[in-house]
Amino acid sequence: MRPQEVILAPIITERSIAQQSVGKYSFEVNPKANKSQITTAFISVFNFKPLKVNTRIFKAKSKMDWRKRLQIKASNRKIAVITLDKNQKIELLSLKTK
């Protein structure tokens, strides 16, 4: 897989922003990607070598469409939390405060 296919988007929530001060960054990744593919894609995109990569899989929730009597299921999501050294920061993802 190409790096653009592995790392899909950064996750911007209150929790992920709080973790950025510790050096942890959250990204939504391809559900088929493993940790080594996520590491190589992160190195090629951001030019930093991560200390650790943790992944979580969120199972899709199903809802019922009562008009059509069909069950609708969203797709599964996989999130990677990448830990960097304390001296390294990703400037694109850090918030600017006045």
Image (tube, rainbow, N blue to C red):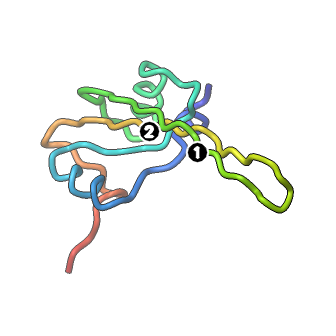
Q: Residue at 48%, 38% (x, y): give it.
A: 58
Quadrant that contains the C terminus: bottom left
Density class for disc 1 (Cα within 10 Å; few <14, some 14-19, many ≥20) is: few
Q: Observer-nearest residue: 76 or 13?
A: 76
Instruction: Name the image quarter holding the N terminus.
Output: top right
Q: Position of residue 69 (x, y in %)?
A: 83, 52
Q: Amino acid at mark 1?
A: Lys
Left or right of residue 59, residue 21 in this image: left
Residue 95: assigned label: none
Residue nearer the viewer, 43 or 26: 26
User: Which amino acid type corresponds to the residue marked 2 in the rendered image?
Assistant: Ile
- Residue 79 placement, left or right of 50: right
Residue situated furthest bottom in the rendering? 98
Element assignment for label 1: loop
User: Which numbered dot is residue 61?
Assistant: 1
Asked which secondary structure carries label 2, the reply is: strand
Of 80 and 40, the residue lying toward us: 80
Q: Residue furthest right?
A: 68
In the image, residue 16 sits, relative to residue 39, either above or below, namely below
x%, y% of residue 41? 47, 30
Q: Residue at x 39, y 58 (%)?
A: 12
- Indicate left or right for 5 with 90 as reference: right
Question: How many numbered marks appear?
Answer: 2
Would you name the residue on which mark 2 appears? 79
Does the CB distance between marks 1 and 2 fall below 8 Å?
A: no
Residue at point 29% right, 30% down? 50
